[in-house]
Image (cartoon, rainbow, N blue to C red):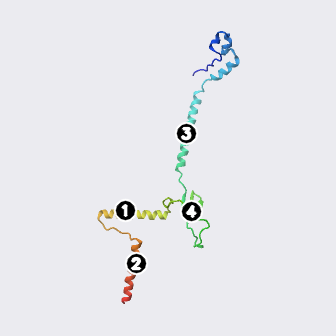
Amino acid sequence: MASYQPIPSSDPLDLDSTPQHETDPSYRPLRRSVQEEFNRPPPSWWKRTLLILVILAMAWFSIWLGRKGMEEKGPTIIYANRYSDEHKYRPAASPVITEYLSGNRIRLRGASIGGVGIEEKDIPLTPVQKQARDKKRREEAKNKAREKMGLRVKKRKTLKEKKAEEEWKVRELEKRIKGL
């Protein structure tokens, strides 16, 4: 390790005119003690090792805490009915009621979860809606597979087709009744 050397405070040209004891740093006792502070011995090897181990342990602990925080999942949302059985047609006092339940769960009640400026696709689906969506996707996949294999495809009727079929059945029944 390099030792500290004081910077000369006088011009090098003036060194010839001043006596040697004034320029010698070891001549002054106070300056000597200050200089010894700069030339301290390095810390022992076990202190250095302990410092490195503590830094590594703190780094590991911070990474461990970060991973633990990422593992925790967000709150579970429970959708409740807006109207009670007793007051079936009376709306809630607030459009949306949010209750924070134990176990990191949230119960939402009331009007639309989204507000102004929220798109329909951004609103989370209820478990029933998720099941219906998955069932519809499975049916579509089955129909596509049947179509590729040349089998009979189950066609899903639209609302208009259902109404037209219902009207046709009603007309047929009326004809039978009038014909009797």
Residue at mark 1: 141
Image coordinates of residue 134 in percent, x first then y, are 43, 62
Residue at mark 2: 166
Residue type pointed to by label 2? Glu
Could you tell which of marks 1 and 2 lies nearer the N-terminus? Answer: 1
Residues at discs 3 and 1 in contact (Cβ within 8 Å): no
Compute the Cα span from label 1 to label 4: 33 Å
Image coordinates of residue 111 in percent, x first then y, are 56, 65
Residue 165 lies in quadrant:
bottom left
The answer to which of 112 and 108 lies nearer the viewer is 112
Local SS, label 3: helix
Compute the Cα span from label 1 to label 2: 28 Å
Q: Nearer the viewer, mark 2 or mark 3?
A: 2
Q: Residues within 10 Å of mark 3 (few under 14, many from 20)?
A: few
Residue 21 lies in quadrant:
top right
Local SS, label 4: strand
* Figure check: 24 above or below 157: above
Residue type pointed to by label 3? Ala
Q: Nearer the viewer, mark 1 or mark 2?
A: 2
Could you tell which of marks 4 and 2 lies nearer the N-terminus? Answer: 4
